[in-house]
């Protein structure tokens, strides 16, 4: 499932709990077809930090080294981060 779709499910589960349409994390897990443990985690995060705690955090994970600085000497070239050789 795409990260944005996962976020939608988390928000819907929490909305159901908050509105009283479901009474327990177990019931929410059954209705939405997700793990009860996940529902509990989402619910606690929501109660502690609000809706922002359930949003997708996009990060750049290319797995490729990033060029960060020119050392100025042709023999050294660019320094690499991320395991580059």
Image: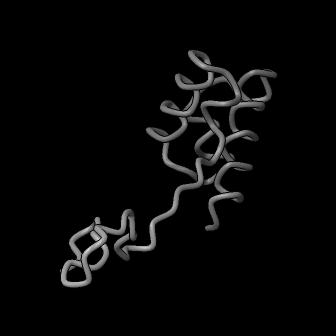
Where does residue 25 sit, x and y in percent of width and height?
57, 30
In this rendered view, identify the residue nearer to me: 53 or 74: 74
Check the image and name the residue furthest to the top.
Answer: 48
Where does residue 7 sit, x and y in percent of width and height?
68, 49
In this rendered view, identify the residue nearer to me: 57 or 1: 57
Where does residue 84 sit, x and y in percent of width and height?
23, 77
Check the image and name the residue furthest to the front.
Answer: 73
Q: What is the total number of numbered labels drawn onto the structure image?
A: 0
Q: Residue at x 45, y 66 (%)?
A: 61
In this rendered view, identify the residue nearer to me: 35 or 85: 85
In this rendering, the answer to whether 29 lies above or below 4 is: above
* Picture colour scheme: one colour
Q: Is residue 82 visible?
A: yes
In this rendering, the answer to whether 30 lies above or below 72 is: above
Left or right, 74 with reference to 47: left
Left or right, 70 with reference to 44: left
Q: Is residue 80 visible?
A: no
Q: Residue at x 28, y 79 (%)?
A: 77
Q: Quadrant of the N terminus?
A: bottom right
Q: Residue at x 37, y 64 (%)?
A: 69
Q: Quadrant of the C terminus?
A: bottom left
Q: Residue at x 48, y 32 (%)?
A: 41
Where does residue 64 sit, x and y in percent of width and height?
37, 76
In this rendered view, identify the residue nearer to me: 43 or 34: 43
Left or right, 19 with reference to 49: right
């Amino acid at each position: 499932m795409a990260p944005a779709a996962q976020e939608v499910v988390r928000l819907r589960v929490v909305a159901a709990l908050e509105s009283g349409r479901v009474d327990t994390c177990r019931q929410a897990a059954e209705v939405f077809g997700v793990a009860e443990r996940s529902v509990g985690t989402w619910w606690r995060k929501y109660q502690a930090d609000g809706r922002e705690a359930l949003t997708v955090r996009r990060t750049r994970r290319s797995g490729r080294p990033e060029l960060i600085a020119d050392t100025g000497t042709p023999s050294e070239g660019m320094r690499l981060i991320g395991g580059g050789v």
